[in-house]
Image: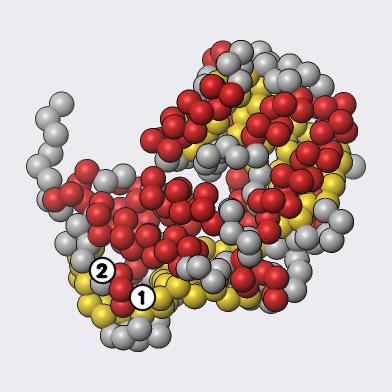
Amino acid sequence: MLKPEAEDGQASLADPQFRADVLAGLERRPRAIPARWFYDRRGSELFEAITDLPEYYPTRTEIAILERICPDLAALTGKGRAVVEFGSGSSTKTPVLLRCIAPAAYVPIDISGEFLRQSSKTLSAAFPELLVLPFEADFMRPLALPRAIADQPKLGFFPGSTIGNMTPLMATDLLRAMRASLGEGAMLLIGMDRIKSPDILLPAYDDAAGVTAAFNLNLLERINRELDGDVPVDRFRHVARWNDDRARIEMHLEAQEDLSFTVAGRPFAIAAGETIHTENSHKYGARDARILLRAGGWTPVAEWTDPDGNFGVYLAEAQAERPAP
């Protein structure tokens, strides 16, 4: 098949969904671009740096919970499951889980292929007897998992409160997609950040060192790199807000002056003070989390939290659907 001539230079080589989402997001009002496009290689590296920041409590809190609940988790899940991690990133929490439950295989799924392969290689070296099957894919829709684990019981792993990046409707759809991918009888171990004081939340998304700001602004740099953009990145600033009505942190990129630029050959103008909404991080109460899981087709089995109640870890099961109460 002949490849069509490039109409937009480098933009023609970019992920077509990235291009479509960026152009649609810049055209809509209010402007918004899906947060999943943060995670090119540079974005993934910056996020891993964020998880080590003193202000960013979720990672260390969740790891401490996982280490504490290991005996309970092993008893509830049993041995020999294939662990399927959705959005694995650098898999920093994964070793805790793998040491705990002695799985038959590990399937990390991530949209950032280069980062996925690198982290999988590191994990394989740490667990040389474990079958590791990296899977580059968008896990927002049902997936045909590797045939090597087709007959094995499965444990989905979705740590980091990544579910909070999605609107409730999208989160429900994702949970249903996970259920379809993993199958009836599968289990899901998922982290969800809890509602708490904005005095704790806001610094976690606007750190003193400016790493989160660099992470947010990297989205514009990626647009310039991959979509032939000339966005003046230094004329935008990172903004984090607590939206109490929707129980979420919002991240925005705010124009510091009236700006004009092009992306993939299309012109755009943005006024001073106008923002591009780049991420949500919804926070859940314990009851909210259970309702969300049930709406997505998962029956809660157990839940754990840290002593301060800042973060929750939930184990749920894809039980047979009942036609009536």
Q: Residue at x 49, y 75 (%)?
A: 239
**Is residue 145 placed above or below 49 in the rendered structure?**
above
The image quarter containing residue 308 is: bottom right
Helix, strand or loop for disc 2 = loop
Q: Residue at x 44, y 32 (%)?
A: 118
Tags 2 and 1 in contact by the CB under 8 Å rule?
Answer: yes
Locate the C terminus and report the quarter of the image it occupies: top right
Residue at the disc numbered 2: 231
Q: Look at the image and tell me whether residue 236 can be seen.
A: yes
> How far from the left and from the top, in percent, is residue 193?
71, 57
> How far from the left and from the top, in percent, is residue 264?
21, 58
Residue at the disc numbered 1: 236
What's the CA distance linking mark 2 and mark 1?
Answer: 9 Å
> Is residue 234 rendered to the left or right of residue 60?
left
The one nearer the camera, 3 or 35, is 35
Q: Residue at x 30, y 70 (%)?
A: 233
> How far from the left and from the top, in percent, is residue 109?
52, 34
Locate the N terminus and report the quarter of the image it occupies: top left
Dot 2 or dot 1, earlier in sequence: 2
> Is residue 217 rendered to the left or right of residue 163?
left
> How far from the left and from the top, in percent, is residue 288?
79, 58
The one nearer the camera, 294 or 67, is 67
Q: Residue at x 59, y 24 (%)?
A: 126
Answer few, some or many: residues within 10 Å of disc 1's Cα (few below 14, many 20 plus, some between 14 and 19): many
Answer few, some or many: residues within 10 Å of disc 2's Cα (few below 14, many 20 plus, some between 14 and 19): some
